[in-house]
Image (cartoon, helix red, strand yellow):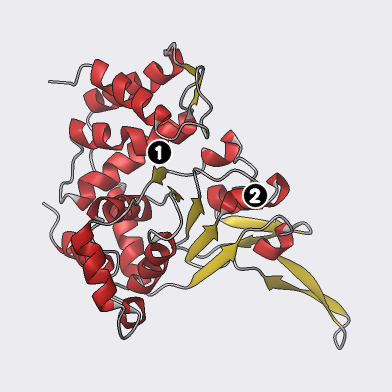
Amino acid sequence: MITAPKDLVERLEAHIGRVLLGKPEAIKLTLVALIGEGHVLIEDVPGVGKTLLARALARSIGGSFRRIQFTPDLLPSDIIGTNVFNAPSGQFSFKPGPIFANVVLADEINRTTPRTQSALLEAMNDRQVSVDGETYRLEPPFMVLATQNPFEFEGTYALPESQLDRFMLRIRIGYPRRVDELQLLAEHRRSEPIDQLEQVIAPSDLLGLQASVREVRLADELSEYLMDIIDATRHSPDLHVGASPRGALSLYRAAQGMAFVENRDYVVPDDIKRLAVPVLAHRVIGKSFLQDGEPGRADSVIRDLVEQIPVPG
């Protein structure tokens, strides 16, 4: 069994839960993506704690944090950086953009143009950016949490499938319970709880966790089960486009991460079932609905497919 790593994960989970009250599933899924070396798309209404989650995560791992507010006039260079002329030396030097951080919050990512959205693709997929023919590595750990409002579409640019596919998970936070919201009001009476949040693990510890997650065992019959789900999305009469090979790999990595968070060194079928919707629903396109027009419709299609597929004995 996993002992010391489990303690680190539990400390992270409890620490973030001190400021994001009553949302254990959202925190757990975010940690699954973090230790699985993935990125998260948070799709929810304003004011439910999306920015708070990202800030709490960065503080808890002792990492750098940058928030990028996406607007229609944002340029790719505003994200990745640019070469600046240095008059005394007569040479150009690279000035890094806010993408050079451990945790990057891409706030309202669908409010900027596709050209600027695409600036994130190389960074998210390859952990590097290219400027004027030069490649610059993004130091690990590196994670993008992007947010978008699923109900307001005026002045927005829908994320293309190629970019949605870069997100390991899509999650929703939702409104807090009344009891949690009352506690929230009391805690904000004198100060912001996030300001008192301290580091609980070192970035080097996180890199060790990420390496350990890759060692979590996923039996051959569970790999077949996972692929049965992927194939079902590709042949479903309700879907135009099914999950990609990247989607299959994301489900594999996320299942390893969930097992690790649950203190197991092996994946069980429930890990895959639990993650099918958050990993796959944003990657598919339905025949009878607009993906962004009916929030939750893709979720129900994936959920129905999973229920129809026999679980390995």
Rendered location of residue 48, percent (x, y): 38, 58
The residue lying toward the viewer, choosing from 275 and 131, is: 275
Q: How crowded is mark 1: few (under 14 residues within 10 Å), some or many (20 or more)?
A: many
Report helix, strand or loop for mark 2.
helix
Q: Residue at x 31, y 61 (%)?
A: 208
Q: Which amino acid does label 2 sit on?
A: Gln
For the point 65% across and 43% down, which residue is it?
157
Find disc 2 in the rendering and name its residue: 117
Instruction: Give whichever of 247, 46 is nearer the camera.
Output: 46
Quarter of the image where one finds residue 308: top left
Give the total of numbered labels: 2
Tell me if residue 112 comes above or below residue 63 in the rendering. above
Residue type highlighted by circle 1: Ser
| Residue 166 sits above or below residue 289 on the image | below
Is residue 220 at least partly visible in the picture? yes
- Residue 309: horizontal and vertical position, in percent? 25, 17
Residue 158 falls left or right of residue 298: right
Q: Which residue is drawn at 79% across and 59% down?
A: 132
Looking at the picture, does residue 289 appear above or below residue 145? above
**Numbered tag placed on residue 250 in the rendering:** 1
